[in-house]
Image (cartoon, rainbow, N blue to C red):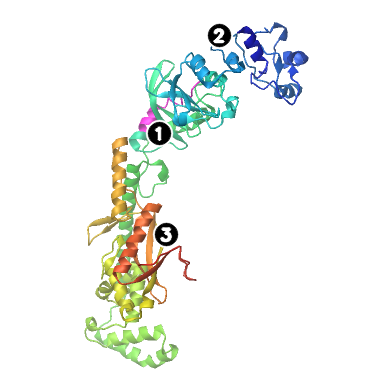
Amino acid sequence: MASKHVEGLRKFCRLCGLQRALSANRKPVEKKKKAKQINKICNVKLEEDAEDIHPPYICDTCRRRLDRKAKIELFEFQACVGTSCSICVDSDPNSTVEKVQEEVAVSLGFSVVAGENDDFRFVKLRVNSDIVERSVTVGKDGQWEVKLLGKTIANRECLGLPSQFTAEVLHKVASLKLCTGNVEYGELLKDREERGTSFPSGHVCEGQLTVNGKTYEKTVRHKNCVMWCEIPNRNQCNACHMYRSDLSSMTTQMRHRKLNPFDLSASSKVRNDLLSPSEVQIKLKNVQQARQSEKRKRYKLQDKLLEREGIDLDEEQAEEMKELAEAVEGDMKECMPEDSYQRLLWEEQRKMSKMKDARSMRWHPAVIKWCVALHAKSPAAYKMIRKSNFLKFQTTLNCYTDFTECMEGYNLALLDRIWKDSNLQNEKQFKRNVSLLYDEMKIKSGLVFNQRTGRMMGFVNLGSLNTEMGSFGARMEELDSGKPATPEIATHVLAFMVRGICSPLRAAFGFFPCRGVTTSELCWCVWEGVKLLERKNFEHGSVCQDFNLLKFPNPIYTYTVI
């Protein structure tokens, strides 16, 4: 065994301890030729080396570092320990993974389990726990993978190990000092859980950890935690150690907030990302109340301004105004072209002024359409015009704007109106060919109360099937986490529109509030729209996305009804 150990040492570098001293393309570098440099830089006396403990060669990388007088991290070699010695096992040409499994793994505290695809897996459990502390998976081709506390070590080069599995891999993994994260911030962790906020650039890991004789149930790790300590005298990896400064700042802010609570008034300057969900709701409620108060004040000021500066006309003055309007009627007609909208509005107002009861006025359809568009753009602007007794027909507008209920999803009443107004039932069959268009639009998030239905609008709603699947997934997450699921507020709207291929038809008939759409969710929405179009005797021909009004969209999917 001693001769086998000495033979195996020839492959290792005396300084870095890596198995790269021998190479087929160059002559090995004897450590005696660099004795002076090694003594000066590494403070190692080669005369005291033992032949059965220390290798006789150094690798080419360490040779170049010696020439540059660069610092080298010295590897400490140990005497041969018998059958479990990694150097003896690696130097044996008959050594296999099974042999390493029998002789080395058990001695290091690993258990051997069968992995997927007939791979070998060496597992080491945490004491008095079922948590896998560290595991090594070896494939048939000799490639290996290390997991520490369930996280795969992506950068294996930092461990300084070869790509092919050797007993040295088990020894290195067994000697790694695991990162404990930041366990000292229990007060901050508890506060974050109560407020329902997460850690920026970090996450909470559960599981018992013993640090300096104390047991902790949870710890805070950085998102880039490598799960092992690069510096032996620390309990954290470099990422978690640097994250401690951020956690200390968060703790200071938390204690300051408890002594001086955040200002949640409408004029507060506190950033919303620093508030908990409950605090955001309180601030939002205060802002809404402040807006309502400001609106009432503005209306009162307008009324006061009209009372102070407005002029009331008696019957005689009203007659004079009518005569003045009739006198300038000719000049007004000369200023306004005959087919202009200004001329139409003037004539409609003249017609209404001659009526004894303004409620019997039958307005021109163009004027009604303009008022509907104005009311849809800004109800406050139309209300201000209406208060001046100009275009005062709110009831008439309600008959046009409220002919159907404002709802999420596909509006069947609106689709019936589209089919009726398009008059395609009296046209030739080829003019019934239509295309279903859809696009996603960014909206301002918020909730709106529908007074007619008593429902809150603004939550995510992608149809009956998608809503049921989402509710089922939320209930499963609630059972797993133990935390109640809250409905999500939509940030986008998925709108659906029908456009005629051989006709000028173009109208939207459905929208779905969402926070982004997956393929399966979009599939149900699209096919539900196709089904509704075909029930209305439309000849559906294609489905298009990202519609551009400047040109006809290219169909991304077509099919033929058999």
The answer for how far apart the CA atoms under marks 1 and 2 are is: 57 Å
- Quick one: label 1 or label 3, which is nearer the N terminus? 1
- Quick one: label 3 or label 2, which is nearer the N terminus? 2
Q: In this view, does 309 lie above or below 184?
A: below
Dot 1 crowding, Cα within 10 Å, few <14, some 14–19, many 20+: some
Quadrant position of the N terminus in the picture: top right
Q: Give the range drawn in magenta.
A: 177-191
Q: Residue 431: which quarter of the image?
A: bottom left
Residue type, label 2? Gly
Which residue in the structure is indicated by mark 2? 82
- Residue 498 pos. (x, y %): 37, 69
Does residue 234 appear left or right of residue 332 in this picture? right
Res. 254 mark: 1
Element at label 3: strand
The answer for how far apart the CA atoms under marks 3 and 2 are is: 70 Å
The answer for how far apart the CA atoms under marks 1 and 3 are is: 38 Å
Dot 2 crowding, Cα within 10 Å, few <14, some 14–19, many 20+: few
Q: How many labels does the image show?
A: 3
Which residue in the structure is indicated by mark 3? 441
Does residue 5 appear left or right of residue 450 in this picture? right
